[in-house]
Image (cartoon, rainbow, N blue to C red):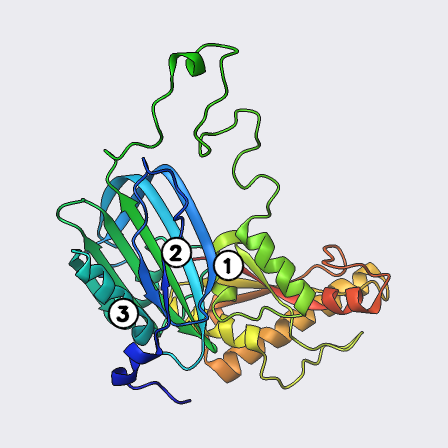
Amino acid sequence: MIRRPAFALAAALGLTVSLLSGLSVAHATPVAVSLPAGAEPLRNQDTPLATLLLPVGPARGDAVPTRSYEGRVYRRSWRVTGDWSALQVLAPIRSTLVEQGFEEVFACTARACGGFAFRFGIEVIPAPDMAVNLSDYEFFAAEHPETKAVVSLLASRTGDSVYVQLLERQDPSAPLRPPATPDQLRPGGAAPTDPTAADPQAPPAGAGQPDPAERLLAAAIEKGSVLSTGAIADLLTLQGHAPLLDLEFASGSTRMGEGPFDTLEQLAAFLTAQETATILLVGHTDTVGGLDANINLSRRRAASVRQRLISRYGIAAGRIEVAGAGFMAPLGSNATEAGRETNRRVEAVLVTP
């Protein structure tokens, strides 16, 4: 893989992203950041009043030291595809922040941050809008001494992309919206003129939208596997279990294909990084055959996955238990071959973090 040299970075940067520019002038606007041309926006969230925990040091044990800041919080993320390293994407954003007057509070790289403990001890935008490779990420936190704004910047290379998130807290003294007039405060009065004011009859933000785990799982089922690096770790963290949908089992067979299988490698990486974690592997089948036979079959499939984790990836046997559910928990319809194929799977359940 070819990396762009540092001296070519400035020439390659073709995009300055400044989102939410349409906010009311009474609102503080988020900082502008520099990203490579073609950067794909993934998350653009504005919370009028929230708490941002700013990491101020590396992980110590299972905890990350933080400072708490209240105010308007912006959460933004992007995906940059190409031969960029995490640092090549993060460095220009960091420079832009410094030019705007921000002062570094804390910065680190993957292992020096605390690896797994740091990654799961800080706020990370849920997948699929952010992905973190435990061995390849950069972090930067800063505060502006005059405006009192604080930022938390994280960049990580996973697969062929670099994911970037910027969490930003603005000074809580900035007005959230223009003050209401007496008419607007009286029952039956005029409707608020501020376009950002909440409609009391409107559903809550995000209503009707699946949660991040559901979105990630739905994408996995549609594609037949969990594609993004780190997705298995995110699913285990978000919902406590993750399906290994790219494993190959013929109908009625306990023999797993040789692979390699991406989800199994992700699970092995998770277990290697989190040395105290224990899991339960649960086998599932289609509806071909009776229930008792399928429960036995599904347990043997789970046992074959356990053996692969032990023999090929060096995971201690005592950290992995197995069980069989037969066809009692389908993910797809058993009326179609595609659905039956999805149902022939093994799921990892996180028992001990």
* Residue at image mark 3: 92
Q: From the viewer's perspective, is 352 left or right of 122?
A: right
Task: Quote the CA–CA distance across marks 2 and 3.
Answer: 21 Å
Say if 116 sits above or below 123 in the image: below
- The tag earlier along the polypeptide, 3 or 1, is 3
**Camera-side residue of 288 and 197:** 197
Residue at 23% across, 60% down: 97
Residue at 38% across, 64% down: 164
- Amino acid at dot 1: Leu
Figure quadrant of the C terminus? bottom left
Residue 14: x and y in percent read 37, 72
| Few, some or many residues within 10 Å of mark 2 (<14, 14–19, 20+) | some
* Residue at image mark 2: 124
Is residue 277 at least partly visible in the picture? yes
Give the label on residue 236, or none.
Answer: 1
| Few, some or many residues within 10 Å of mark 1 (<14, 14–19, 20+) | many
Figure quadrant of the N terminus? bottom left
Q: From the viewer's perspective, is 291 left or right of 4?
A: right
Q: Secondary structure under badge 3?
A: helix
Q: Secondary structure under badge 1?
A: helix
Is there a contact, CB below 8 Å, between mark 2 and mark 3? no
Select label 3 or label 1 by which is in front: 3
**Camera-side residue of 165 and 190:** 190
Residue 242: x and y in percent read 57, 61
| Few, some or many residues within 10 Å of mark 3 (<14, 14–19, 20+) | some
Residue 17: x and y in percent read 37, 60
Give the label on residue 255, or none.
Answer: none
Is there a contact, CB below 8 Å, between mark 1 and mark 2? no
Q: Residue furthest bottom?
A: 2
Quadrant in the picture for residue 111 = bottom left
Select label 1 or label 2 by which is in front: 2
